[in-house]
């Protein structure tokens, strides 16, 4: 399965309290999918401003937007939220036929996990579990790390 299909599937999977998904949630979700589901031949991540980052994901988000499979919803900041489009839902039907059941369950579990966390809690989790990806963060790590894992 192509990594861009996994990205689209992740954006699509409906979970309670998460109709729109932010770039940080997408990035950390894709990172957790790679790390915790042990995916090979997936996005490569590096330590960046908000922890693990794959610039290829931003490129794929642009392609999925241009293909009208996802839409960008402006935020009050300088970035967009994302959501699946009707055309994207149609594409998901063919992706769903080819996705491994364990992978699908793992992706759903990670999206539910992300939906249940604030951005602060999500970063705290990732920084604690994968500190090598937090070294270039602009977030005050000392203050963040004082909080116990929730």
Image (cartoon, rainbow, N blue to C red):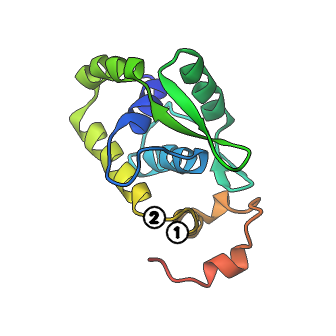
Can residue 1 be seen in the rendering of this structure? no
Which dot marks residue 23? none
68 w.r.t. 6: above or below: above
Label 1 close to label 2 by CB (< 8 Å) = yes
44 on left or right of 95:
right
Residue 150 percent across, percent down from the top left: 44, 77
Q: Label 1 neighbourhood size at 10 Å, few (<14), some (14-19), many (20+)?
A: some
Q: Secondary structure at mark 1?
A: helix
Residue that appears at 35% across and 43% down: 107
Count the marks. 2
81 w.r.t. 135: above or below: above
Residue 111 percent across, percent down from the top left: 39, 49
39 w.r.t. 124: above or below: above
Residue that appears at 51% across and 33% down: 42
Q: Which residue is mark 1?
A: 121
Q: Label 2 neighbourhood size at 10 Å, few (<14), some (14-19), many (20+)?
A: some
**How far separated are the C-alphas under marks 1 and 2?**
6 Å
Front residue of 37 and 61: 61
Residue 142 percent across, percent down from the top left: 71, 79
Q: Quadrant of the N terminus?
A: top left
Can residue 85 be seen in the rendering of this structure? yes
Q: Which residue is mark 2?
A: 117
Residue that appears at 49% across and 26% down: 70
Front residue of 139 and 43: 139
128 on left or right of 107:
right
Q: Secondary structure at mark 2?
A: loop
Residue 14 percent across, percent down from the top left: 32, 42
């Amino acid at each position: 399965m192509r990594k861009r299909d996994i990205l689209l599937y992740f954006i699509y999977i409906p979970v309670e309290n998460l109709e729109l998904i932010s770039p940080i949630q997408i990035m950390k979700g894709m990172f957790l999918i790679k790390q915790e589901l042990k995916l090979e031949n997936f996005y490569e991540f590096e330590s960046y401003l908000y922890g693990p980052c794959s610039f290829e994901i931003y490129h794929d988000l642009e392609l999925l937007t241009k293909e009208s499979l996802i839409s960008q919803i402006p935020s009050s900041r300088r970035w967009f939220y994302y959501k699946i489009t009707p055309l994207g839902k149609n594409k998901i039907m063919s992706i769903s036929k080819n996705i491994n059941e364990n992978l699908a369950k793992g992706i759903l579990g990670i999206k539910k996990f992300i939906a249940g966390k604030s951005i602060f809690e999500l970063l705290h989790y990732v920084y604690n579990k994968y500190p090598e990806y937090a070294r270039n963060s602009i977030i005050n790590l000392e203050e963040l790390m004082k909080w116990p894992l929730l």
